[in-house]
Image (tube, grey):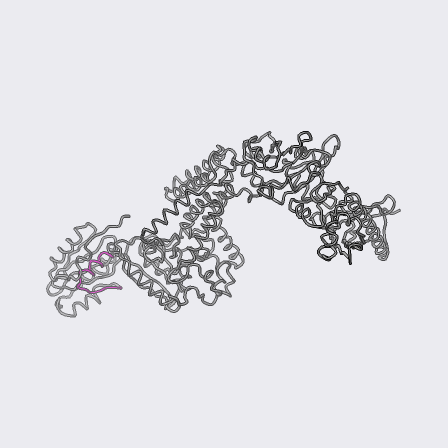
Amino acid sequence: MRRIRTPKQNKYAGEKVKKDLKENQEMLQQIFHNTIDIKFRNFQIQNQEQTSAFICYMEGMVSEEFIHFNIMDGLAGTNLKDINIDSPRFISILKNQMVKAPSMKETTILDEILDGILTGQTAIFLNQSDRVLLVTTVSFQSRGVEEPETEATVRGSREGFNEVIQTNTSLIRRKINNSNLIFEELIIGKETKTKVRIAYLNNVANKEVVKEVRNRLKAIKTDVVLETGYLEQYIGDHPYSIFSTVGNSEKPDKVAAKILEGRIAILCDGTPFVLTVPHLFIEVFQVPEDYYSNAYVSSLIRIFRIMALFLTVSTPAVFVAAATFHHEMVPSQLLTTMAAAEERVPFPIFLEAIIMIVIFQLLREAGVRMPRPIGSAVSIVGALVIGEAAVQAGLVGAPMVIVVALTAITGFVVTALSNAVILMRFFLLILAGLFGFYGLLIGTLFLVAHVVSLRSFGVPYLTPLGPIVTKDLRDSIIRLPLKFLQSKSKSITRKRL
Amino acid sequence: MFGELTVLRKLMLILFIFITFLSGCWDAQELTEVGIIASMAIDKDENSGEYILTSQYLRPSAESTFVSSQEEPFLIVSIKGRTISELMRKANHKIDRRGFYAHNKIVVVSEEVAKDGLISIFETFQREQEVRSYVWLAVARETSAASILEKKHNSISKLPANFLYSLFDNAEYDAVASSLLTFYKDALEMGNSPVLGVLTIEDERSQKDLSLSGGAVFKKDKLVGFISNEETMAYNWITNKNKNSQKGALTFPYKKNDYITLDLSELESKIIPKATNKSDIALTIKIKKTVEIAEQQEVNNFPQRKEVVQFIEEVEKKAEAEIESKIIQVISKAQNEFQADIFGFGDTLNKKNPKVWKQVKDNWEVEFSNVSIDLDVQVEILNSGLIQGSLKPKQ
């Protein structure tokens, strides 16, 4: 997906349509370079002058059935023998009686017409008139509302966003039936002209943050926006950090919950991933199910998730440090077992760890990208060859396989942070391999210092843990019962920008 | 985060890379390069007077789950030399792994070595810190220290070091479980002397069984003699400083051939010195024991509650007398035979009565023998199990 740069933008800015019908049609054909998916239909209106007219639309972007019944039927079929094209009644009859559509717009500006046609509107051109009627006839094929694959749940809504921004808007609206829920629309991307919407609760969200989001979105100067990931990288506070300070989700219930907490959602046409800002570190441990099930279980599992993060980041590093630098720190029995397993392995433990983790990353990548029908091949190769056979052959020690397996499994627990986790894991592993626990300590300090310095739209990334927001600790490492969560949380909404 | 690469930043980046990759790994040691030493024994060659260091190395490959090995999971190497650190280095020439002593669990010394004094030969342990201070320390009695490290029949663990370690861990009050650290504390302190555990090999059913029991009495760091199991019990009750002093059972005759066993559940002991000048030093040893009746061989039955109380009081009295006699025995042995203050009386006196201590400290070994001791032993039976007496067949 290459970003294309074109020097000239908006060639037709300010231009207006001509009066002559033929001239208009030729101009459109020329502008669209005779692309085959633009359709013209010429006809005559049954009025005094037998005005000739044409409609223009993009094939596949519109409902042809709708055009047939609601536009063509009225335009070509209505008898208006006594009405002159220049009379003001003509336009009003045209708009009110002949064309039956929920949304239409009258314009003379060429740019608007082009945008309209490109987004699935039908333009009606009349001879000797420089006014063009744009009728919303948009209809295209889209995926249904399906269960999101990235965020499966046992309990809770199974709806997921799809690629159509209107559907996604409605999915959020259905969760929050409240007049305070506001959607705003922006068009971003000079080439793609992608619709981007921001959603927030007017009475909860911090106005300053809303303004900031709006400004940052407006400041994006790019040609291409194909996914919210583009926006994320443009509007994030720390584009060079390994941590993302913008959250994303495919689940309307999750996004609705975040909006209700005072966050701002950013929807983008063409992707089911919706961004939420401000995004805090603690959110990676919060899962919708936490709130749908018992508080004790939720709290316990949340603690496990936090443990999982530390394990997945540091297990290989700790193992390598202990096995190459600090033999005295390992219990004697364990050390004997480890030494027994390493006895036949030809590589240093550090190299072994690097090899195994790289192989795991490759397997994971293969598992994600491969076509589904050959899926089983990867798991067989992964499980048997890399695990069992490598140990049998004496290329890898069994404890290392367990360490990597533990790393992998715990890595899947905190998926929201998986990108940062991979980098942190290598970072700490290399430091541990070079300097042992000393390196591990320095690396951890560096990471902690970095995380503490982050901000997301004015909110410190580690809120409510650092700085401590006492009130919001109720839903951080543990989740208190809902009774204690009723009042609004402060971390997100309090003013500080 | 990165911004523009200014000259300074470039320099820092280069420095960072140099520091990381040129300095790293210098002390890294792969597991396949180290020889883990699990226990050590120090003997003395009678002819040359050199020390013999016997080390038990682990052989991890024998523990491998993939290849079942017929090899023993350990390897014993003996080296002769003049200093211990010399021996520890020499061992690296004789075995294909570099010795790693941090996991060493036990240091056994022979009687001859112990008689010469231990502080001088353990000097390197303190200086180089290779052997940790929490290793168990014991004296091999009537056998060479090296023979202790060999595998014994009464060992469930495949590794002799683990077997020895468990012996110390499970030790009750008829044995002494003393670590290098407690040895140093007792030996270096004023008015105190250490007692170490004793490992003996007993011939039983033509097998050689190893046991940890009794105590080796030191005068400062030199071995002066041994105390029996019974005396070790009394020693442990007085000092009450190890975990194992709190564990064990006391068996004594209750009526002629019927024995009674009391299981110790709590032990409190206190030494109270009383002195005005160097001639009238008196010590009161207060011992309070809480016990449970574990077994009683005499078949009796008490229909009345009153009889039970009487019985318990009677047992308590007998137990007190038994304990007192044992304590007197060990104290007199320490005072007269060894003249070694293994109970730390001098230290207690120093803390309570430093003025008197100053007068006697230079000649404490002699003075210690003349100290008069009072005993105050209290035994409390907390629980007698079957309260109405033992089971008795009806006539």
Q: Residue B79, can we see it?
A: yes
Is residue B321 a member of the stretch shown in magenta? no
Q: In this view, does A435 lie to the left or right of B366?
A: left
Look at the picture and state if B24 lies above or below A270: above
B35 or A151: nearer the eye? B35
Q: In the figure, residue B130 lies in which quadrant?
A: top right
B161 or A35: nearer the eye? B161
Q: In this view, does B3 lie to the left or right of B312?
A: left
Q: Position of residue B21 (x, y in %)?
A: 41, 43
B181 or A212: nearer the eye? B181
Q: Position of residue A470 (x, y in %)?
A: 49, 65
Name of the residue lying farthest toward the bottom? A88
Q: Residue B78, can we see it?
A: no
B292 or A63: nearer the eye? B292
Which residue: 22% across, 63% down? A99
Which residue: 37% across, 42% down? A370
Numbered circles on residues, count: 0
Q: What stretch is highlighted in magenta?
A: A102-119
Q: In the figure, residue B176 lies in which quadrant?
A: top right
Q: Where is residue B371 in the image (x, y as percent from the top left)?
A: 79, 51
Q: Quadrant of the C terminus of chain A?
A: bottom left
Q: Position of residue A286 (x, y in %)?
A: 46, 57
Name of the residue lying farthest toward the right? B395
Is residue A103 a member of the stretch shown in magenta? yes
Q: In the figure, residue A114 lies in which quadrant?
A: bottom left
